[in-house]
Image (tube, grey):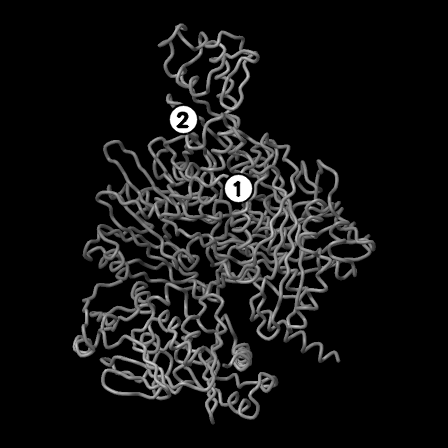
Amino acid sequence: MKQFNFHEAKSVKEAVKFSSKNSAFLSGGQTLIPSMKLRLSSFSDIINIKNIKDLKGIKVSGKSVKIGAVAKHAEVASSKDVQKAIPALSSLAGGIGDMQVRNKGTLGGSIANNDPSACYPSACIALNAIIYTSNRKIEAKKFFKGMFETALKKDELVTAVEFSIPEKSSYVKIPNPASRYALVGVFLAKYKKDIICAVTGAQPVVYRSEEIEKALHNNFSPESLDDLNLVTEDMNADIHASADYRASLVVSAAQKAVAHCK
Amino acid sequence: MASMIGSKVERKEDKKFLTGKGRYTADINLHNQLHAVFIRSPHARAEIKSIDTLKAKKASGVVDVLVGKDMQDDKIGGLIAGWKIVSKDGTDMKCPAHPPLATDSVNYVGDHIGLVVAETLQEAKDAADLVKVDYRVLKAVASTAEAMNSDVIHDGIEKNLCFDWELGDKAKTDEAFSNADKVVKMDILNNRLVPNAMEPRASIGDYNSSSEELTLYTTSQNPHLSRLVMSAFNAVHPEHKFRVIAPDVGGGFGSKIYPYSEDVIIAWAAKKLQRPVKWVCERTESFLSDCHGRDHITKCSLALKKDGIVTGLKVDTIANLGGYASLFATVTPTYLYGPLVLGLYNIPTAYCNVKAVYTNTAPVDAYRGAGRPEATYLIERIMDKAAKELGMDRADFRKKNFIRQFPHQQCLVHNIDSGDYDAHFDKALNLADYTGFEKRKAESAAKGKLRGIGFSTYIEACGIAPSAAVMSLGAGVGLWESAEIRFNPTGNVSVFTGTHSHGQSHDTTFAQIVADKLGVLMENIELVHGDTDKGPFGMGTYGSRSLAVGGTAIAKACDKIIEKGKAVAAKMLEANVDEIEFKDGEFIVPNTNKKKTIGEIAFACYLPGTYGEIKSPLPEGMEPGLKETAFYDPVNFSFPAGSHICEVEVDPATGETKVDTYTCVDDFGNLINPMIVEGQIHGGLAQGIGQALYENAYYDETGQLVTASYMDYCMPRADNFPEFRIDYTCTPATSNPLGVKGCGEAGAIASPPAVMNAVVDAIGTEVTMPATAQKVWKALKEKSKSAKKAA
């Protein structure tokens, strides 16, 4: 790790003020710190945001669940309110990394990093999330731009995410056997008129699978996906999963998601 | 006093390790210590045109930047292969020069170019970025299969062939095959593994310029041998002024048996710079630079009679040695492998040919089981295939071919002293409820899952090793072991062993032997190991040898203590020495009330002539003190054996394999501490199941290690395993007085074929290790494609 200046921000305003071209916001640090330790990245300034009061807390209303950016995965997983409102969201949070990661890693950090294998982006897309930042609101579908790329500006900070509450939902992750990140993850949300199937891990960035959504519109059952062959050309391919295997896993995960949707 | 041997005594080590009080090399910090970082090759194969260290040398905090030329100038020798193998044409194996720091060329990613030494680790790392190495990158030889048809890596070593070795009677085996009713052939791939000890390697060199003593703290399974090699071959420092300390070591699995380039370089650097130099390996550095394990490609065939009797075996293996021949690299795929390919079957003739090749990958050396897992994997896989092709029950077919008479001289090398293979196999079949398998298979099918059952039986040659035998086969040293029992005047005991505990619980197991032998309480016995300045020379820990060889040395030293004690007791009790009996820590004169405890005897031995009515307690001419040394050279290997049965359930949609049940019944001879044995089995199974389903060190065609971190190298986790069903049978070893056989490697040896036979049984088609979900999914897809074609 190379040397840097450390700033303890007390407010969102102060955090933004500290930021510069070569700074990084530190939340749970579950990606930032390892990459700095491995010297894959270095910054002149690290701005600690995890003690900012305004970024904390979970609020559930009739229609939505609003979670502060520095809410840890373990908090989301164990929140009775979230479990009741959107059980799939709490189970997603409870399946990220291991206990140590969940006690450190945060929602804001996860979506700002936008790792193609992260779980949360799929929840944001499927649950029509609004992403609140230090200076605006962004719809989830406009937030995730590309691999490790978001709509955030350099000095912009995620402050909270507001998820809409669907009728039913479920999240199924098929983990990479080594890292246990999502090889593929499918977040399925069923609304009165709409079905959203958001897929993470399979392509460079989270996306909606129109093929799956269409098949489920006709018949919301695992069997309706039995003969579905997804297009493989945009699928990620690596030693753990070729494009055609990933495509097949998306269908398997979606079938399980339908079966467990509640 | 209740017998300690055979009881589940709580580990003496637990308190320290479970409360974070272990003292590992990285925990040690010396006054005035410098920190070192290695410059490593990013290329698999390249010529070094130049190394520019000027900028780095001027960087903040940097004390020196050392390169190969500096070592050459100081006449530091290269690394050696310690076991000479002779090719079938009578020529000696061919080993390239292996300088600790490369001078002309690099031969794998991670090969050593230089050492940056600075006041802080941060400064050393910053300066390392400033070292400029000009390489001429050459085409890498990364494939084991293609190595002999690729560019020559080392000048003068044609076809990249280190040796072309054979074992067995070729003519007789050919004849068996021509007379066979049936021949079964099989291609076998044994995947490459990274040992992944929990504690990465580390070294600290410390030179005392006034006494001219050099101390190296290092993560070694074998500090005495490391010192010997570094003194005799690397010429780092004379042995009598060189101390190697291996403090607490967090696992080795073979990868820490021998000194590495880093040990030689750090010891030399400390002496050169006259300040302590510390290096701690990072995890990815460890993936790149620790010796790897396995990596065989084998073609084998089995000759059979119609009734299922095996009449011959042929094995043709290419073994990858990596970029250089590491210390035990040449024995692993030969004498630790070839003789074991027979398994525990009565096969009248066999022929085994091994070609060991160099490639531009990390060196490959011993890894838990070392040769024996490779042998067991091939024989157990082909036995399964043969049974299926013959239409025989796989369990019956195995039983039909078991060795049943002991001692049994195998057709290759080993003379097996004892065993009862039906006993553990039958017990395992019962414990695994083999007869209920079809019912369980139907239940799995109802859930849309494919269930399979796999068997594996094995023998391993442990208790390494009888010196006469191994030295006649090319070993550079005999593999005996030493022990010293030192009674302190107050009656407690220090036990010195030349073995080394890095997870094997020697502190407890060896203390149990001493407690039983001498009648001393466990808490009054301290095991001392891992320091060449304490205790006699020893051969370290590997090859499931410590108990059978090192434990026996301890028992023998105890016998000498008792013998001396009897003489002293006789004098003190005014009896004849023949009359004295020793039991539960007391020397007694039977049928009298005359007795002395061993503590009293020890006290008397250290204070001769000081008390009581007897002027001196020591018989005339006897030396004072109570300390005995024993060196034990075993008369034979020991031959643990066992039967393992695995049941898996495969999800055809994702290809994922779940190990549903795992049963093992092992014959390790007598058990000293069954709880510790069980722990060893668990660890071995984790590594063996890991090899079968998850772990793979994968180099791409340019020689880059793709799986160089836990993001891509899949280590098994606890949730990958079921509750293991463990039981034992016992036929005591006749080759050592404790009747023990060794248990450290069995799990890793037996489990890969048990798992793979189960997977192949479940999916009905072949798949190579590791049987990852992706591979199984693809194999099932291929199978259904060809089934459709056929239809």
Residue B284, x across and y down, in percent: 39, 59
Left of A33 or right of it: where is B399? Answer: right
Q: Give the mark toward the camera: 1 or 2.
A: 2
The residue under the point 37% across, 86% down is A62
- Label annotation for residue B577: none
Q: Secondary structure at mark 1?
A: loop
The one of B340 and B396 positioned closer to us in this rendering: B396
Mark 1 is on which residue type? Trp
Please give the chain letter of the residue carrying mark 1.
B
Disc nearer the start of the sequence (1/2): 1
Would you place residue B790 above or below residue B483 in this image?
Answer: below
Measured as percent of width and height from the top left, residue A31 is found at 33, 69
Name the residue tied to disc 2: B492
Residue at (19% x, 72% y) in the render: A9
> What x and y, as percent, mark residue B645?
65, 55
Kindly report the distance in space between the C-alpha atoms of the residues bearing marks 1 and 2: 41 Å
Image quadrant in which the C terminus of chain B is located: bottom right
- Mark count: 2
Q: Secondary structure at mark 2?
A: loop
Residue B83: which numbered mark, if any? 1
Residue B93 visible in image = no
Q: Say if residue B603 shows up in the picture.
A: yes
Task: Check the image and report above or below for B564 versus B655.
Answer: above
- Residue found at x 39% / y 43%: B15
Residue type for callout 2? Asn
Q: Nearer the viewer, residue B745 or B279?
A: B745
Q: Nearer the viewer, residue B139 or A107?
A: A107
x, y percent for residue B654? 57, 73
Q: Which residue is depicted at the point 64% across and 50% down?
A: B353
Label 2: chain letter: B
Q: For mark 2, does the 10 Å Cα neighbourhood hold few (<14), some (14 to 19), or many (20 or more) residues?
A: some
